[in-house]
Image: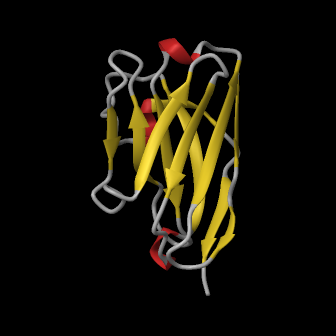
Amino acid sequence: VQLQASGGGLVQPGGSLRLSCAISGLALEKNNIGWFRQAPGKQRERVSCTSSDDGSAYYADSVKGRFAISRDNAKNTVYLQMNSLNPEDTAVYYCAQRSVFYEPARSVKAYGYWGQGTQVTVSS
């Protein structure tokens, strides 16, 4: 199983980026996928996730209304569209597959396979 995150980069405040998480070795349509981020000196936090059951999505309060998660089961890829970016969004962003269901979905412990991370820097 591999998750490959990409799409990060340097963007000015107010700008947009779209992250991609290409997945191989498992069927996206049967899996819940989360996006996490980790800023320097901070804990890794969940920003969004998508459910395979009903396609529902979760967003952290800090990104609600600005980020949108989507999935393309045919391409086995999950996307995170990020709009109205601000410097507080600067972090390494990771995608991960949820595999431990007795752990809460917000916990990193609930996720088994992780992508390598992609750096997002928001700066003028």
Q: Quadrant of residue 32?
A: top left
Q: Position of residue 54 (x, y in %)?
A: 32, 18
Quadrant of the image containing the C terminus? bottom right
State whether residue 76 is above or below residue 115.
above
Nearer the observer, 75 or 109: 75
Residue at 70% from the left image edge and 52% from the top image edge = 7
Picture quarter containing residue 40? Answer: bottom right
Q: Is residue 109 left or right of residue 104?
A: right
Quick one: which residue is furthest to the bottom in this view?
124
In the rendered image, residue 71, in percent from the top left (x then y), is placed at 52, 29
What x and y, as percent, mark residue 121?
63, 72
In the rendered view, would you say 7 is above or below 109?
below
Residue under the point 37% across and 23% down: 55
Residue 73 against residue 111 in the figure, above or below:
above
Nearest to the observer: residue 44 or residue 76: 76
The residue that appears at 64% across and 42% down in the rendered structure is: 20
